[in-house]
Image (tube, rainbow, N blue to C red):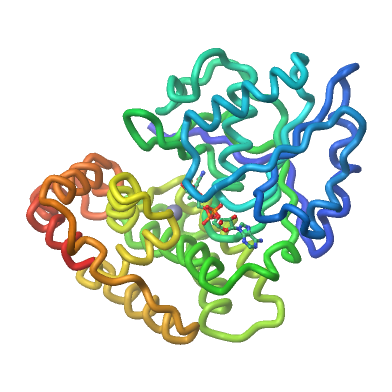
Amino acid sequence: MYRNFSIVPKIMFGRGSFNQLADVLAPERVTPDSYVVFVLDDVFIGKPLEGRIPLEKGDLLIHVNVDDEPKTSYIDALVEQIRKYNPVVPDGIVGIGGGSTMDIAKAISLLLKNPGSSADYQGWDLIENPSVYHLGVPTLAGTGAEISRTTILTGPEKKLGINSDYTIYHQLILDPDLIVDVPKEQWFYTGMDCYIHDVESLHGTFINEFSRSFGEKSIDLCRQVFLEDHPDKDDKLMMASYFGGMSIAYSQVGACHALSYGLSYVLGIHHGIGCCIAFDVLEEIYPEGVAEFRKMMDKHDITLPKNITADMSDDAIELMVTTALNLVPLWENCFGADWEKIMPRERCKKLFLRM
Ligand code: NAD
Ligand code: ZN
C-alpha cells in the first residue's frame, strides 16, 4: 500500500520575508472577536524579533520555554491558558522558534479543536477534527519539523508524536535572516539532525526515488554549509532542512534516531546533540556518513560530550536499549526485515556504552 501524504500547502521563502507575516495572516482573521496566538521561544524575550511580531488588538503572545523538550502536560496547560484568555477559538496559531516551539504550536492548534489531553493523541492518525490554522516560522534549521506531519511530545508513558495530516502547518515563512545569530554549537547540532536524516534515508532499505531526490539535494546543501564557506549558508541550511524533512516523510530515519530516542527518554538529552552523540558511534553502520560528520565536527571545532553512560545503572542502560529497539520501523529501514538478528540487545547495549 502506498501512503498518500499531505504536505504544507503554502510557503514563503527569503530574507526579510518575516516582515510579510501581517499580510499573510490578514485573510485568516475572519471570525468576529477572534484573535491570533503567537507562540514565541522565550530566547527572544526583549530581542528585536519580538518587537517585529504583528500583534493586533486582542491577540495573545505566549513565551514558551524549551529547556526541556515539549511535554504533553505543558501542551495541556498552554491550551488551558488560551481558553481562559478567550473562550472563542483563535483564528490562527503562529509558532516562532526551533523544532520544539514549532512542535508546541502544532500541538496547541490540534488540541484547541480536539477534546481531552494531548497524551490521548500520541500515535498515528488519532486526531478527528481539523486543527486551527497554524503557521510556522523556524528560527533554527535542521529538524524538518516545519514540514513534517508530527509533533513530538513526551507524555506520561511514552515519547511519541501526534502524527496526522492535521498536524501539518498550513503556511511556512522561511526567513534565513532568523537563523543568522544562532550560537555555533546549537547551529551545528540542529544542522546535523538534517545531515543525519539524509544519511539514514539514503542508506535505508525503504529508499525510493521520491525520497532519494529530496535526500540527495539536502545532503549536497549540508556539505556546502558544513564543509565549504558560503555567504548564503543560512539560505542553504533552511532549504536543506526542508528537503531532508521531505526525504524522510516518504522513507524513514534509522539506527541513529532510534538510539537518540533512548538518550532523550532516559537522560533528557536534546534531539540534535543526542543524534550527534549516537551517530559518532555508528561508523560500522554508516561508515562514509560518520567519516564526513567527523570532518564537519573538526572544521567547526565541535567537541561532543563523552562518557555520558559511564555512571548509569544497568537498569537505566537496559531501559535505553528497550526504548531504542521498540522503534521497529527505524530498524527495519536500517537493516531490513531481519533487523533483530543484526541488532540484538547486546549489540545495541554496547553502542550505548561507547557513548
Ligand atoms: P529547540 O527548538 O529545542 O531549541 C534549542 C535551543 O535553541 C533552545 O534553547 C532555544 O531557545 C534556542 N533557540 C531557538 N532559536 C534560536 C535562535 N534563533 N537563536 C538562538 N537560540 C535559539 O531545537 P531544535 O534542534 O530546532 O529542535 C529540537 C526539537 O525538535 C526536539 O523537541 C525534537 O523532538 C523536535 N523535532 C521534531 C521533529 C518533527 O518532525 N516534528 C523532527 C525532529 C525534531
Ligand atoms: Zn531528527
Which residue is at the front of the view, 90 or 344?
90
Image position, residue 173 (x, y; %): 75, 50
Is residue 164 shown above or below 120?
Answer: below
Q: Quadrant of residue 115?
A: top right
Image position, residue 94 (x, y; %): 73, 39
Is residue 89 shown above or below 246?
Answer: above
Residue located 81% across and 54% down the image: 18
Residue located 27% across and 54% down the image: 259
Which residue is at the front of the view, 154 or 289?
154
Image position, residue 354 (x, y; %): 18, 67
Is residue 125 shown above or below 135?
Answer: above
Left or right of 248 in this view: 75: right
Left or right of 282 in this view: 151: right
Residue located 71% across and 76% down the image: 232
Visible in this render: residue 311?
A: yes
Image position, residue 163 (x, y; %): 47, 32
Left or right of 180 in this view: 241: left
